[in-house]
Amino acid sequence: MMILGIFYFIFGVCIGSFSNVLIYRLPENKSINFPASHCLKCKTPLKWYHNIPLFSWIFLGGKCAFCKTKISFQYPLIELICGFLMLICMFKEVSNFEIVDYFEIYKTFMIGVLFIVLLAMAVIDFRYTAAPSVLLYVAVILSLLYKFNFEGVKFALIFGGGIFILTFLLTKILKKEAMGEADIYIFACIGAVLGLNLGLLAVFVSAILSLFAFMVVSFLFLLKSKKNNIKSNTQNQNISQYQMPFIPFLSAGLFVVYVFEDKCQLFLKMIIEGNLF
């Protein structure tokens, strides 16, 4: 188990290192291959030993080896999170560490990389309130490959198609965009991975998380308004114009329900049987 865990952690950290490249370059329409890794400040190409995930940042003291500019803590943080994501998926998917089950190993890779891709999109969505199309396509493909059956395709179409129709109708009624197109792909991922009941629960969890986040943002707007003596009507306008990214919360809802699937199943059973209270 220890050897397998170390392998998955290292794999996750390495994929996380690559996801940092995606986070930085894709939103700016830059090639992920050229130029080679370099300091964002002095543009000096990095040596191979400057690119070792986690360790290079630690040994360099979080600074460029050439110009000594501080390197964002985001890089090792994303790598570390991705390593733990792969570990969590391993413990979730592997049922017996004494027997090698190649299908479980395959599923661990698919779902682990899916969550790493969703993490990259979440960071990009927070910064730009948008997500690169290529990552959306990859996420849907990974979710279907993880499920690897017709049920996954069916519920991906149900969730993605259902939200597409709902968004189209709301946009016509409200005369403005009701939901981002990118969110539809994440709904499809939720349907493919979790199915109907757990998928709906994941959407509910996502909504609760986003509502809490919006309350926090509104509170911060209020504090800023009082500090800068901004009128209440201007403050309300600023809040109404704020675009809350939804991909991070959809991804979090999917992850929470996936990890605690057994408890969520029990929770749904209690609701259906009326034994919740």
Image (spheres, rainbow, N blue to C red):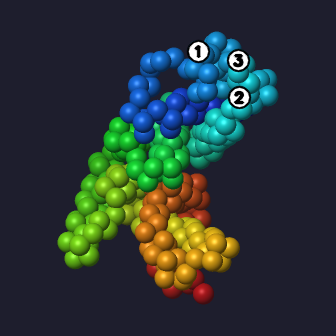
Q: Which residue is mark 1?
A: 45
Q: Is residue 142 visible?
A: no
Q: Which residue is mark 2?
A: 69
Dot 3 or dot 1, earlier in sequence: 1
Indicate the position of residue 122 as horizontal and vertical percent values.
Answer: 50, 50
Q: Which residue is mark 3?
A: 66
Dot 2 surroundings within 10 Å: few (below 14), some, or many (20 or more)? some
Q: Which one is nearer the viewer's eye here, 149 or 134?
A: 134
Instruction: Estimate the spatial distance between the alpha carbons at disc 2 and disc 3, rounded to whole Å.
Output: 8 Å
Q: Amino acid at mark 1?
A: Pro
Q: Quadrant of the C terminus?
A: bottom right
Q: Is residue 84 above or below residue 266?
A: above
Dot 3 surroundings within 10 Å: few (below 14), some, or many (20 or more)? few
Horizontal side, residue 10 vs residue 272: left or right: right
Q: Amino acid at mark 2?
A: Thr
Check disc 2 and report its element: helix, strand or loop: loop
Instruction: Estimate the spatial distance between the alpha carbons at disc 3 and disc 1, rounded to whole Å.
Output: 10 Å
